[in-house]
Image (cartoon, rainbow, N blue to C red):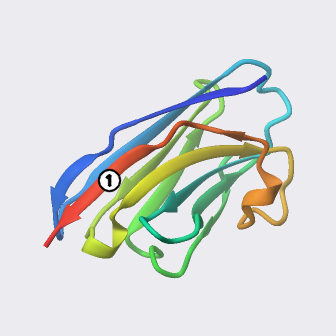
Amino acid sequence: QVQLVESGGGVVQAGGSLRLSCAASGPTFNIASMAWFRQAPGKEREFVAASIWSGSTTDYADSVKGRFTVSRDNTKKTVDLQMNSLKPEDTAVYYCATSTYISGVRYAVNYAYWGQGTQVTVSS
């Protein structure tokens, strides 16, 4: 099965930047979408951003649009999330996930494989 490993989380002040990376291994030949979700304490997991197929098509949650950028390298089997202008409300555990679907990318139920998560903390 597909294995995903995230890296790059940490603590940053509001207005700062972080870059998360996710590396996939295993049978990745049928991965269509790679996405980032996040979960803050006491809240449900929410969609952040997705990269579809080669990465030419992307989707973002309204809350991060214009601040976050998702990029994908199918040769390296990686997907990154560049996060700029971070806000305290961006504090969460960020998860990488993969799906064989190209639609419904905002819905966690469509993702079969998940990473272990990486903590992002934005201080005010």
* Relative depth, front residue between 123 and 24: 123
The type of residue carrying mark 1 is Val
Residue 78 x, y percent position in the rendering: 56, 33
**Residue 79 appears left or right of 1:** left
The mark tally for this picture is 1
Q: Look at the numbered disc 1 and give the secondary structure of its residue.
A: strand
Q: Is residue 32 visible?
A: yes
Q: Quadrant of the C terminus?
A: bottom left
Q: Using the rendered view, name the quadrant where residue 122 is placed.
A: bottom left
Report the residue at 79% width, 23% height from top: 1
Q: Above or below — where is 64 with respect to 71?
A: below
Residue 16 x, y percent position in the rendering: 18, 62
Farthest top residue?
Answer: 26
Farthest front residue?
Answer: 42
* Relative depth, front residue between 58 and 21: 21
Residue 100 x, y percent position in the rendering: 85, 44
Residue located beneath label 1 in the image? 120
Farthest bottom residue?
Answer: 62
Residue 118 x, y percent position in the rendering: 41, 43
Report the residue at 65% width, 45% height from top: 97
Q: Using the rendered view, name the quadrant where residue 91 is placed.
A: bottom left
**Residue 108 appears left or right of 63:** right
Report the residue at 26% width, 70% height from top: 85
Q: Above or below — where is 72 with respect to 60?
A: above
